[in-house]
Amino acid sequence: MRNDVACQLKRIGLSAVPSALDDFIARASKARWSPPQILEALASAEMAERYKRSLERRLRLSGIRTFKPMTEFDWNWPTKIERDIIECAMTLDFLGEVHNLVLVGRNGLGKTMIAQNIRHTAVLAGHSVLFRSAAALLEELHRQSPEGRRRKLRTYTNVGLLCIDEVGYLSFDEKAADLLYEVVNRRYERKPMIVTTNRPFKDWNEVFPNATYIVTLLDRLLHHADVTVVEGSSYRIRESERKTAARRGRK
């Protein structure tokens, strides 16, 4: 009998209670729940299960891996950082405003860490997120068939928040610039982006030499954007020097 009930619940799209039906019935009987209480508990369990599955799916699709939380970020290390802009971005207000966030600065100053924390906050808040390095995104688009590329472009266009990391770490050909322009143009005034780069915008012609769309690409990327520059010495170099000094101190 209970197996039949569990199957019927699954057929109508419920998943939380069928897998623990015996426990649910035992709790309802012991507490002498009224019919409205049973329905309330059933709905509550189903909502919690669906939120859990949705979160797991968004985390899986986002490309999130391990990262340092913002509590470990040393705000005093950079010689220049606009903390108010970054903390405002952590509230996710820019998503509703369809603004972009662009982080500019040399390697090792925490740009990727900041972007990773914002994307994680967005996922927890229920947004769909994709995080890709510029090299991975462009390689993925470049090696697709025309139909596969159209599908990938739709994915990059429709996701709630797209994070493109490390623009400028490698040089690309004009074809890559065209592909990046296509992504930015499709999201323009529709969906927000986070972009990190180690190169000032005047140098993007060196990142994408012979590309014809750089000016237009930057125009659309920066039209509705908060651009914040981080300056200073690399965290990673500092940590490496500290570890080296600590090892020497133990000798």
Image: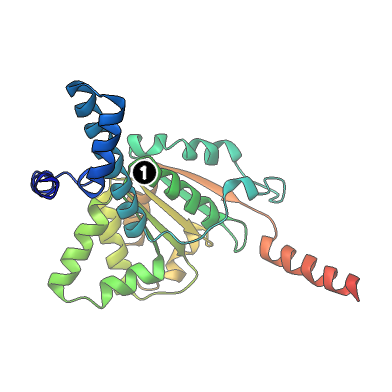
Residue 44 coordinates in the image, percent (x, y): 27, 32
Left or right of residue 150: residue 45: right
Residue 130 coordinates in the image, percent (x, y): 34, 56
At horizontal 27% and vertical 51% (from top left) the residue drawn is: 159
Q: In which quarter of the image is residue 40?
A: top left
At horizontal 22% and vertical 34% (from top left) the residue drawn is: 42
Q: Which of 200 and 238 is in front in this view?
A: 238
Q: Which residue has dot 1 on it?
A: 223
Residue 207 coordinates in the image, percent (x, y): 44, 70
Q: How many labels does the image show?
A: 1
Q: Which of 186 and 57 is in front in this view?
A: 57
At horizontal 48% and vertical 67% (from top left) the residue drawn is: 168
Q: What element carries label 1?
A: helix
Figure quadrant of the C terminus: bottom right
Left or right of residue 174: residue 201: right
> As shown in the figure, which amino acid type bears the numbered disc 1?
His
Q: Quadrant of residue 75?
A: top right
Q: In this view, does 79 lie above or below 39?
A: below
Name the image colouring.
rainbow
Left or right of residue 161: residue 246: right
- Residue 234 visible here: no
Left or right of residue 7: residue 28: right
Q: Is residue 91 above or below residue 197?
A: above
Q: Is residue 82 above or below residue 185?
A: above
At horizontal 33% and vertical 46% (from top left) the residue drawn is: 52
